[in-house]
């Protein structure tokens, strides 16, 4: 009989030639367990997904309760389903008044695609501006506005009338003009290695969009739900977009995404043509029930505030000759080690030290630390010590 590892390599479509190949049988809180009982401390949360940890009791309870009621009923937007409407109401209560209508989908890429269509239809313009080293997904539309030619070239031709400009380049904002449908920006560039905007940069984008009649879209797929010390980057930077894109942590570990806007803007999707943007499984009731429960946990357990304190623990503990800096706020951090060879060795060998780490797509000299926001202090410190041992080995073996 073939092993799960062999079956994985034989029958599963692969995303790279070097997957982590860590087999997980169970996950609880901040720990993953292999079939042999080996423990791995999760320091990436499935790439900013498991903000409330794996299988939080309240999330599991909400899923079980919804399973006893109903699963899929109808394509999105036709039937009144309590998990959807209650979750949309709670999200709206946490956001500025102009972000009060939610359109649920299945993923971040889908949410970005929806936001792009919404902006083009509302403004009746075609140009979409994004930023170099930005990541917005891998579907054709989202890939068109991605900020790296390396990942785009093999799939061209992509969508026309897109433009990528420099992040933190104030002069490049002159490109926003009367032909621009929207500007989509990550308030913090995650895959670029956790790059924060310079003071006033996001506000200047907002000003320029308002002056030229373009919409501003925030992609908070990675920064949302407490990850950088505030519930949303909107709260951190004080800049309000016209459309907000959410995914990853929104579902509490279940597949879910959303784009959120005002009633006025969102209304254009419901006519001319009707059913111009539809999804079969978007806003699945089980996923919305999980998402609502996870959001309530983040609020009740003050996880946004806690992750700022835990970020301080990481930065205090991770002192090593290979570490140039630990960049970021909250629990979305980039550990800069300056050499791609260090990064490759560290991420590849982390499971052997009982920790799970990850790369950034557009920054090969740093690796990601983004654990669950509720990771206990003792486990967090233990993981840092295990990482320091890995760094010692890296220093010896990599030249």
Image: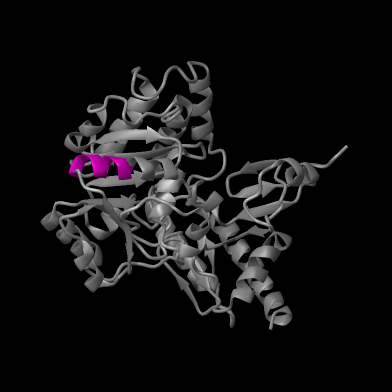
Please state the extent of the stretch shown in magenta in the rendering: 115-123
| Residue that appears at 21% across and 33% down | 268
Numbered marks: total: 0
Q: Quadrant of the N terminus?
A: top right
In the shown orientation, is residue 295 left or right of residue 334?
left
What is the x, y in percent for residue 172? 25, 70
The reply to whether residue 222 is visible in this rendering is: no
| Residue that appears at 16% across and 35% down | 264
Q: Quadrant of residue 272?
A: top left
| Residue that appears at 20% across and 38% down | 265
Q: Quadrant of residue 184?
A: bottom left
On screen, 37 above or below 65?
Answer: below
What is the x, y in percent for residue 207? 15, 60
On screen, 330 above or below 32?
Answer: below
Please say which color scheme the image uses: one colour
Q: Quadrant of the C terminus?
A: bottom right
Give the main secondary structure, helix, strand or loop, of the magenta stretch.
Answer: helix
In the shown orientation, is residue 17 left or right of residue 110?
right
Q: Quadrant of residue 358?
A: bottom right
Tell which of 181 and 54 is nearer to you.
181
């Amino acid at each position: 009989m073939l092993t799960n590892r062999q079956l994985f390599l034989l029958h599963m479509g692969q995303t790279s030639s070097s997957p982590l190949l860590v087999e997980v049988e169970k996950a609880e809180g901040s720990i993953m367990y292999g079939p042999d009982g080996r423990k791995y401390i999760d320091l990436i949360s499935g790439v900013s997904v498991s903000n409330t940890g794996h299988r939080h009791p309240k999330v599991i309870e909400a899923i079980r309760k919804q399973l006893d009621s109903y699963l899929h009923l109808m394509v999105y937007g036709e039937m009144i389903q309590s998990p959807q409407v209650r979750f949309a109401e709670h999200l709206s209560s946490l956001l500025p008044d102009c972000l009060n209508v939610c359109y649920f989908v299945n993923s971040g890429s889908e949410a970005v695609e929806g936001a792009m269509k919404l902006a083009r239809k509302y403004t009746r313009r075609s140009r979409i501006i994004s930023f170099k080293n930005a990541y917005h997904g891998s579907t054709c539309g989202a890939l068109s506005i991605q900020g790296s030619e390396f990942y785009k070239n093999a799939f061209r031709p992509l969508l026309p009338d897109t433009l990528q400009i420099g992040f933190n380049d104030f002069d490049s904002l002159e490109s926003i003009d009367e032909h621009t449908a929207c500007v989509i920006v990550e308030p913090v560039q995650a895959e670029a290695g956790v790059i924060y905007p310079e003071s006033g940069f996001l506000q200047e984008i907002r000003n320029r969009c308002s002056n030229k009649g373009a919409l501003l879209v925030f992609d908070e797929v990675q920064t949302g739900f407490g990850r950088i010390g505030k519930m949303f980057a909107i709260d951190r930077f004080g800049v309000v977009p016209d459309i907000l894109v959410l995914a990853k942590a929104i579902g509490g570990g279940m597949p879910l995404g959303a784009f959120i806007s005002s009633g006025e803007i969102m209304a254009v999707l419901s006519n001319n043509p009707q059913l111009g943007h539809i999804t079969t499984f978007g806003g699945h009731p089980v996923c919305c029930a999980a998402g609502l429960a996870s959001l309530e946990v983040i609020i009740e357990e003050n996880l946004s505030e806690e992750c700022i304190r835990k970020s301080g623990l990481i930065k205090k503990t991770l002192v090593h000759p290979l570490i140039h800096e630990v960049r970021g706020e909250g629990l979305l951090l980039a550990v800069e080690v300056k050499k791609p060879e260090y990064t490759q060795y560290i991420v590849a060998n982390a499971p052997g030290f009982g920790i799970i780490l990850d790369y950034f797509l557009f920054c090969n000299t740093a690796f990601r630390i983004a654990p669950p926001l509720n990771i206990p202090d003792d486990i967090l410190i233990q993981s840092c010590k295990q990482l320091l041992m890995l760094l010692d080995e890296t220093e010896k073996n990599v030249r």
